[in-house]
Amino acid sequence: MEQPGSDTHLHNRSHAIFGDMSFFSKQMRIALRNCGTIDPDSIDDYLQARGYEALAKVLTEMTPPAVIDEIKKSGLRGRGGAGFPTGFKWELTAREQNEEKFIICNADEGDPGAFMDRSAIEGDPHTVIEGMLIAGYAVGAQQGIVYIRAEYPLAVQRLERAIVAARAEGFLGENILGSSFSFDIEIRLGAGAFVCGEETALMHSIEGFRGMPRPRPPFPSVQGLFGKPTVINNVETWANIPVIILDGAEWFGSIGTEKSKGTKVFALAGMINNTGLVEVPMGTTLRDMIYDIGGGIPNGKKFKAIQTGGPSGGCLSEQYLDTKIDYDSLAQAGSIMGSGGMIVIDEDSCMVNIAKFFLEFTQNESCGKCTPCREGTKRMLEILVRITEGKGEQGDIEKLERLGTTIKKASLCGLGQSAPNPVLSTIKNFRVEYEEHIHQKKCRSNFCDYLLTYTVTDKCVGCTLCRRVCPSAAVTGTPKLRHEIDQMKCIKCGLCFKSCKFSAITKTSH
Amino acid sequence: MATPHEIVTQKRAAALQRLAARGYDAPSKVFIGMATCEIAAGSKEVMEVFQEALKGGLKNVYVSQKGCFGRCNLEPTVDVIKKGKKPVTYGKVTVDRAKEIIEKHIIGGKAIAEYIIK
Ligand SMILES: Cc1cc2nc3c(=O)[nH]c(=O)nc-3n(C[C@H](O)[C@H](O)[C@H](O)COP(=O)(O)O)c2cc1C
Ligand code: SF4
Ligand code: SF4
């Protein structure tokens, strides 16, 4: 029977099957190795792809400390955003003397537009289960919990089926595979607040309290769910574990850069030809990502920026295109790796508006527990709104910078600590756009409505349509003659622009 | 007593047998993307076309769902893996295209170049 990818290494099953597809040539699939190549609802498919062999290996021939050593040696860092070394996290929990410990899979995935974790679970739920099992064995935990948002019904359903199938085969439950190790997993549904992805808020939410963060330390590894030592990792982190166990820390450590090992999954979106889910070795450049894998910018438009890390991340300009995708290089450039959001922005987008979009999101999602985040983001947003409405003032940029820096320093959790990043990074890399908005009342991308001027050009045949659609009676003119717009009355709604059949109305930002 | 490793090896052998019994070794295998994104793009209807064809007597074809392949803008995607042939992935598969794929590729043996993702 054909068993692609089952010869030596687990990764790149899709490559083994669909070798020369250009979309894959610069990718490397470790976490997503089975996504799109097996039936996710069939444990037989997973077993065929060497599923649960890593679990068998640790139970047969590795002591718990040896497992932790292997993960440490691999250099794996958490894929949920912060990039904490996974092996060290496990070790902290393993060291604790406690009858009860927990393993949590963070599948909250609250970043707007992110779908890496959803796809991973929908495509290969068993790998998450296997990863959690291995950690349970390594740290001495018997209970696992997957915290997943209720908005992901199909992922929840696949995971539920996988858990049932794994129990039936004896991979979950008492005395797994005849060993003395027992472990089971349950699913908890989250209501979808962004802050509930933060580990301490997530645990509060599981405990039945409001999902609000608490100060750390104590860290969850020592005092987590219900006060017990808890390992919490992201979906993608879990998906890497079986591969590290089977193919070895040394092999895994040979992929990537010095301090960032392995691969990272990204949801590539925005103004790019090949939108999609990609997994690349750490160290791939942003340029390769955009032009080779992503196929470049559509409609002959020019690249302007790339946003990584979602609402906690930043926007990088063209000069950073050769930046390597790894934790440290991205941070140095002024953005973050984040959990895998990657949005390509072309010349038609206004950077002030992009910053405003992300800040609106975090401002809305702030849980309100601490003042810098709750009030500070509100003040920043007010300034941004003013700027995009043409009411920006001298000193606004400095105010944003000051507020942003303070919020980052003084907020309790990662939400507040990172909320100003989209603003600060666009100020750093696209300051001139802010200045144009404030001083010249100009939006170079013709995006900010309030900064636009609508004018009727020579192409006007006097059809009177715009005059009739204008809600503000700003258009005047007699039939068959060129019409005119009274700028004092115009409320910049754009209806005339959209309605004109002769493209006779232009919108410009002077 | 068997080691966990031996037990999993047995389980895999049993899984392979079950897969074979379900027709996994068929000369043609079809994998249809059935993740949230693929379904939103219309893959359920595509799946139905294949299921109907099986009911209607299409033989020697193993039809399965699969997870997301990552080609958001080209979904729904359908893989056709024929023994001894280079596997192909079709993009933007509609109900009509699915029928065409069954006729021309699966039965007729000729891949339809214009729908193939390069
Ligand atoms: C506001 C906020 C939201 C977060 N959302 C997520 C999330 O959706 N998924 C996730 O894995 N981690 C999220 N995190 C990070 C978690 O707190 C935690 O660091 C992570 O789950 C640890 O797993 P890892 O080490 O495997 O990355 C979030 C953090 C903050 C501050
Ligand atoms: S930083 Fe924001 S989200 Fe985090 S605890 Fe404070 S108010 Fe809540
Ligand atoms: S933009 Fe709106 S308000 Fe201004 S002239 Fe056109 S229709 Fe009237």
Image (tube, coloured by chain):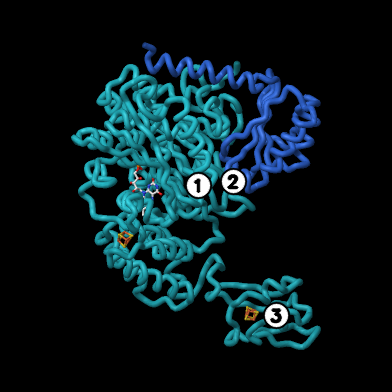
Chain colours: A cyan, B blue
Residue at point 35%, 31% (across, down): A183
Q: Characterize the local packing of mark 3: few (<14), some (14-19) or many (20 or more) Cα atoms within 10 angstroms.
A: some
Q: Determine if the C-beta at disc 3 is less than 8 A from ligand 3.
A: yes
Q: Are discs 2 and 1 less than 8 Å apart at CB? A: yes
Q: Which quadrant holds residue A494?
A: bottom right
Upstream in the sequence, badge 1 or badge 3?
1
Residue topped by disc 1 = A115
Q: The N terminus of chain A is located in which quarter?
A: top right
Residue topped by disc 3 = A469
Q: The C terminus of chain A is located in which quarter?
A: bottom right
Quadrant of picture, ligand 2 = bottom left
Observer-side mark, 3 or 2, equals 2
From the viewer's side, name the closer residue of B112 and A405: B112
From the viewer's side, name the closer residue of A328 and A371: A371
Residue at point 66%, 21% (across, down): B23
Q: CA distance from mark 2 to mark 1?
A: 9 Å
Q: Amino acid at mark 3?
A: Val
Q: Are discs 1 and 3 less than 8 Å apart at CB? A: no
* Residue A28 visible within the image: no
Q: CA distance from mark 1 to mark 3?
A: 40 Å
Q: Characterize the local packing of mark 1: few (<14), some (14-19) or many (20 or more) Cα atoms within 10 angstroms.
A: many
Please give the chain letter of the residue carrying mark 2.
B
Residue topped by disc 2 = B37
A24 relative to A422, above or below? above
Horizontal and vertical percent for residue A34?
A: 52, 31
